[in-house]
Image (tube, helix red, strand yellow):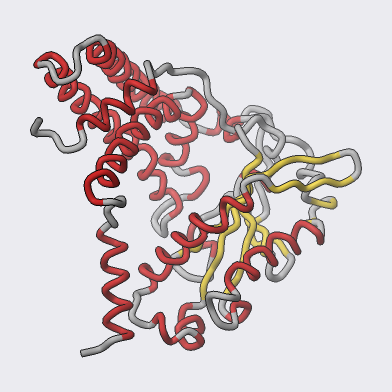
Amino acid sequence: MGVPGLDFYLARAAAAGPVGVHDGQSGYFSRPSNALDPRLFDTDQLRPDVRGYLLETLMDFWRPRYEVVELWTTVWLAGSGISYQWNANRGNGDLDVLIGIDWPAFFFHNPEQRGLSTTEMADQFNAELHADLWPRTAKTQFAVGGFSGIFEVTYYVNATGSNIEDIHPYAAYNLTDDSWTVRPPVLPDNPETLYPKEWWDYVHDERRLADSLIQRYNHVQGAVRTSVPGSPGWSTGGRQLQAVADQIGALYDDIHVGRRAAFGEQGEGYGDFHNFRWQAHKKFGTAQALHEVWSARHTGRTDYETDTYGQPLTTAQESLRTAALWARRYPT
């Protein structure tokens, strides 16, 4: 066949069917409210039960794994969920809990981890949080009076350390100290007016490119689905499908991963172009359509690796982290 995993990829693509681009959701451009979310805040102070749940859920998760957790963590609640745009249709009520680490204190009290760099240790934290904590907090309910809601709570460690202002958050509430670090800005009724025409033109050009790639993908996918598996037309179509899926995947990665630049030390945070670009593509539905193709491509590869090797292959980062810990614990 010449293309590892082609059978698995085609099975995923065929099961998914044609990809459509539909209007999406992003609170980024929504009209702001005149008050913060009453399910979370009493005026501008976070409700004690909300703060207690978010902190204790993390502490209870980490205490069996690491020593003296409270001494090396600072925890924030961040993002649009604690801004004046909380009432927008954002697809889900997401709450981002960001964790700063005092790395010298962490490694002092957890010497068995000293074989890892701060970046590798942050990767390990986040892998554990994503796999074992996020599923527990994906549907968290907060209610007060006549207000209630389901929130998707996610926890994430900042590799850069314990100063959240380094990543230029839109809003950040310090759960550890029970105080605002970055108060949410007061926005105009139409936040779209904050961004220059050149930014909108750039995104619309990308949107047209994405539409053309998705149309091509759907055309080739339809031809493959009507071909006999194993036939020359099926194999040729499969390779064409992978080629256009690779282009779509590259565009999605550039838009999605590129967003990280907005929250790096050289970025400008929530109002940075890279974040605007991602949020605009969410609003237009482009990001969701690109991700649908990306997901089938990624899952097909995982299916192939599981069938061939018995499990998905580890990433280079995971292999390096394991090697570093092994070298620390079992020196030659």
Q: Quadrant of residue 70?
A: bottom right
Q: In the shown orientation, is residue 44 left or right of residue 171? A: right
Query: Residue reaching furthest right?
Result: 145
User: At 46% from the left edge and 41% from the top edge, which residue is drawn?
Assistant: 275
Q: In the shown orientation, is residue 101 left or right of residue 236? A: right
Q: Nearer the viewer, residue 31 or 255?
A: 255
Compared with 268, 150 (above or below) is above
User: At 76% from the left edge and 44% from the top edge, which residue is drawn?
Assistant: 36
Compared with 131, 281 (above or below) is above
* Horizontal and vertical percent position of residue 109: 51, 87
Q: Nearer the viewer, residue 16 or 183?
A: 16
Compared with 107, 127 (above or below) is above
* Horizontal and vertical percent position of residue 201: 39, 23
Compared with 33, 159 (above or below) is below
* Horizontal and vertical percent position of residue 173: 67, 59
* Image mark count: 0
Q: In the shown orientation, is residue 156 left or right of residue 84? A: left
* Horizontal and vertical percent position of residue 153: 62, 50
User: At 43% from the left edge and 48% from the top edge, which residue is drawn?
Assistant: 262
Q: Quadrant of residue 325?
A: bottom left
Q: Name the quarter where the N terminus is drawn.
A: top left
Q: Name the quarter where the C terminus is drawn.
A: bottom left
Q: Nearer the viewer, residue 285 or 312?
A: 312
User: At 37% from the left edge and 16% from the top edge, which residue is drawn?
Assistant: 18
